[in-house]
Amino acid sequence: MRAILRAAWILLTAAAAVSGASAGAMHLRWDPVADTDLAGYRVFWGTSSGSYSQSRDVGNVTATVLDGLADCTTWYVAVKAYDTAGNVSASFSNEVSGWPRPVVAAVTPVAVEQGRTLTLAVTGTNFLPGATVQLGASGITVGSASVSSCTALTVQVAVGASASIGATNVDVTNPDSVYGSGAGLLTILAATAPTVASTSPSDGATGVAVTQRPAVRFSEAMLPSSVTSSTVRLLDGTGSAVAQAAGSPALSSDGVTATIAPAADLAAGATYRIEVVGGASGVYDLANHPMAVTYRQTTGFTTVPDTDLPAISAVQSSEVTATTARIAWTTDEDADSQVFYRKSGQTGYQETAVDAAMVESHSVSIEGLAPSTTYEYYVRSADAAGNAATSSPVQTLATSPSAYSYLAFDAEGGALVSPARATQGADAFGGAWIDTPAGTAAGTATSPAGTATFGVSVPAAGTWHLWVRIYGPAASSDSWFESVDGAARQEIVAPQTGVWTWVAGRSYSLGAGLHSVELGGREAEARADRILLTDDAMFHPTEQPVDDQTPTAAAAAFTAVASDGQNLLGWRNPSDADFVRTVLRYRTDGRFPTSPVDGYAVADRPAAPGSADGFAHTGLTNGVTYSYAAFALDAAGNVAPSAQALGVPVDNVPPAVVMNVHRADARP
């Protein structure tokens, strides 16, 4: 039976190919159907809605060009999917209708100078009433099109004086946004100034009547606005302009002849000449550069206290790499140095430590920048009297891409074993850190006082360097133990107390894939905030928490519904106003991902606050348990506690209905 159906489809397709006598085409696209044994798709079409007289097997693709359609005809199209077992979608996809794509064949004229206004005639086919015209070159204004038939239209075009010179495309877009393009059909030429071809009376003529109406003829049609009594003049023997009557000069209907009507008869026996004035103008740039004189006297009198701010100038960035930059500037007096910087879009600034050296030439290095990121920055300098000035305006620099990876995650997101706990507080990423309560007995390398364990997915084998952001309230509470993949625990100690500091742990040789990072409690009240694992040996993190550090609520109602080779994930995003996206990750070792860099990637889904969302995780192995975690992130990058779900795929789903069939030849 399957062979008979297949043969019938082939015969129907062959008949359609024979009957299609024109070159009309529709470009189509649709969403893929999730089915492990999907074999392909069949496109159906006809000239009546819901009645499809022709079809074509297009194979296992999600885009095709349906050609051989009659032009200027409305076609109705739908799609079905089929699998290797011969199962076919239970119903048709959504129906797409419309004319074939516009074909732009020719334009008249084929060339136009800069500064011209013209009526452009466009010929081709499949032009719907209401179609619009676009030209590829810049500096061109296009009016509304007038469609006289499905094969011809006209449009008013104003070519600016600075329009791009050369061949340009002519596009026609129908009201349904489907468009066609004629490549290089219209050529924009450089404007050439018109010349005066002849005058009347002719040059040197004698015996001219005093009632003569002098005239000048141009080499090409002129705009009426360019022919005035100031640009086309009659001069007497002294070179003075002769007064002209109202409406003079008059431009002929073809735009090439301008006739002057003097306000009174010409004088007898006098000499006159006609003058055409161009649009020349002079531009003069005058600049004054006063000499700056500085007078200093160091002894002999007493002055009022110094209240003058240092004058900052020549602020610039240099030596910008993927993660570092150097900022330099000058001051007009000795002063200290400090740089404030932030990622573009942030509100709060990070800041370098103050360099107390009093100098006029300043240079500060910034470390720990994010690759491929635009930063805004300004500088601050204070003189010996404490007068501090900041630079303006704020400047920008852009870091370059990096081949290295920088995997950061918050400590409170790990799997915590008491007495290790999460504590809310300011000056920490995500508004929280981990610590152990006051009075907790000191831990040892073999028996730590609680642990925090994190999964991390390393993208490539190599040497990876561990960093931890630590705060020690006192010298007796400033250390943790660190370990990766069960290595012997080693102390990691804050170099100074009372401030948050990025502290380097050990370096580890790691293969690509999942690994486990552990922090073990050593001293009570020592805090750990954020952890970074990178294969960039030269990277020194300096990032500080700025702006909003409060995560959104977690994603709600997170479920995983199993089917053949896939899990259908569903959830509701938090309603917090600053929510921006949900990151989905999974593991198959019985553990849930602890952060957006743990486990394996599923999807990164931008969405509106409070919206319901879903994602089909396909290509899975039936019978395997997939442990999912959904992490809601806000605009500042804060990560909410994860929502978790389990899914075990099973093969019980026939092909789904094809969804979102649409024109691929429409403008976005």
Image: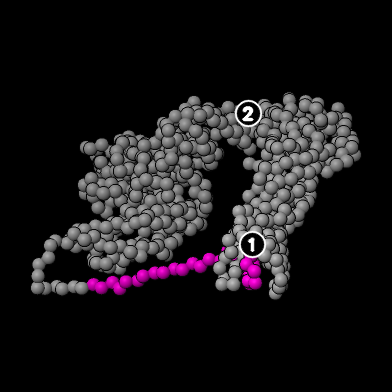
x, y (%) of residue 539? 41, 57
The magenta segment is: 266-294
Determine the residue positioned at 11% across, 73% down.
299
* Front position among marks 2 and 1: 1
As displayed, is residue 551 above or below residue 299?
above
Res. 303 in view? yes
Tag shown at residue 265: 1
- Hey, which residue is sitting farthest front in the picture? 268
Nearest to the observer: residue 459 or residue 523 = 459
Q: CA distance from mark 2 to mark 1?
A: 100 Å
> Measured from the top left, where is residue 39 in percent x and y?
75, 36
Q: Quadrant of residue 352?
A: bottom left
The residue positioned 70% from the left and 68% from the top of the image is 208
Q: Depth check: give the residue in front, 619 or 539.
A: 539
In this orientation, which residue lies closer to the viewer: 558 or 264? Answer: 264
Above or below residue 655? Residue 17 is below
Looking at numbered disc 2 in the image, what kind of residue is underneath it? Ser
196 shown above or below 503: below
Which residue is nearer to you in this view: 288 or 505?
288
Q: Is residue 638 left or right of residue 204?
A: left
Quarter of the picture holding the N terminus: top right
Magenta span includes 244: no
Residue sitting at 41 percent across and 40 percent down?
638
**Is there any visible trace of residue 491 in the rendered image?**
no
**Number of numbered discs:** 2
Q: Position of residue 393 (x, y in %)?
A: 36, 56
- For residue 125, what is the image quadrant? top right
Which residue was labeled with disc 2? Answer: 563
284 magenta-colored: yes
